[in-house]
Amino acid sequence: MHVVIMGCGRAGARLARRLEHDGHSVAVIDKNPTAFHLLGLDFKGTTVTGIGFDPNVLIAAGIERADSYVAVSSGDNSNIVSSIVAKDVFHVPKVITRIYDPQRAQIYRRMGIPTVAPVTWGINKIMDLLFLHRSHSRDTFGNGEVELMELRVPEMLAGRMIREFEVPGEIHVASIERLGRAFMPVAGTKFEQDDIVNVIVLRESMDKYKKMFFIT
């Protein structure tokens, strides 16, 4: 792919290097030319000095042949405006935007622009580390609306049916690791003590998940 990245901070530079390492064509835009030093001397992609919502700057970065556009500058406004230009003017197939304001992130996701909200994700992770002891989050989806939780089954739940712990659209037991082997359970599967269970949980249903699995 050819990927255009706006913002050469730590995130933008690391993403650019990772993409280049994986064999993709990369162009990085930043209004501060000194920021490009984060890419390293061995970076072989394109660097363009300017603002990401300037069509001429985008064209210089190869936006017209881009498969993806990623906006990770430090400014929400710049990220959003440049993403709209990439999506609506240049019709880039995949546009991703980092937004620090969670409320604005939701608005732009509804506009069809996928967003990454580090503040929301970070708060959710911190809450898990503070209060979930026997269970912890392994991954998140979207902006943290859905969590993949891992827990170890206590003795009190051994022998209970999986179906007792599922709520359609809210809580789903995705896999069980038992004696070093993982499998996908069915409705009649029973928990055994010390099973390692992966559960997909809607963030809004996290309290229900804790109560169901006796997590304090």
Image (cartoon, rainbow, N blue to C red):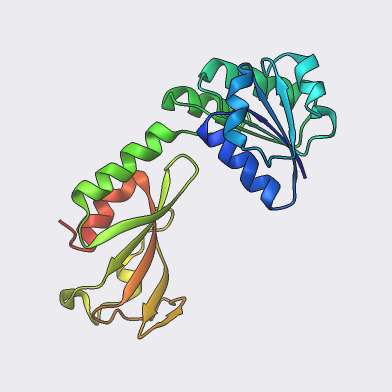
In this picture, residue 63 sits left or right of residue 119 = right
Q: How many marks?
A: 0
In this picture, residue 165 sits left or right of residue 101 = left
Residue 15 in which image quadrant: top right
Residue 108 in which image quadrant: top right
* Above-or-below relation of 93 to 58: below
Residue found at the far right of this picture: 65
Position of the N terminus by quadrant: top right
Q: Residue at x 25, y 49 (%)?
A: 129
Residue 120 in which image quadrant: top left
Residue found at the far front of this picture: 41
Position of the C terminus by quadrant: bottom left
Location of residue 72 in the rendering, given as x and y in whole percent from the top left corner: 56, 29
Q: Residue at x 73, y 23 (%)?
A: 48
Q: Is residue 7 visible?
A: no
Of residue 166 and residue 120, the one placed in the foreground of this image is: 120
* Above-or-below relation of 150 to 116: below
Location of residue 123 in the rendering, given as x and y in whole percent from the top left corner: 32, 37
Q: Residue at x 73, y 13 (%)?
A: 54
* Above-or-below relation of 156 to 15: below
Location of residue 207 in the rendering, given as x and y in whole percent from the top left corner: 24, 49
Q: Residue at x 24, y 82 (%)?
A: 159
Of residue 25 and residue 146, the one placed in the foreground of this image is: 25
Q: Is residue 162 visible?
A: yes
Location of residue 215 in the rendering, given as x and y in whole percent from the top left corner: 19, 59
Of residue 161 and residue 28, the one placed in the foreground of this image is: 28
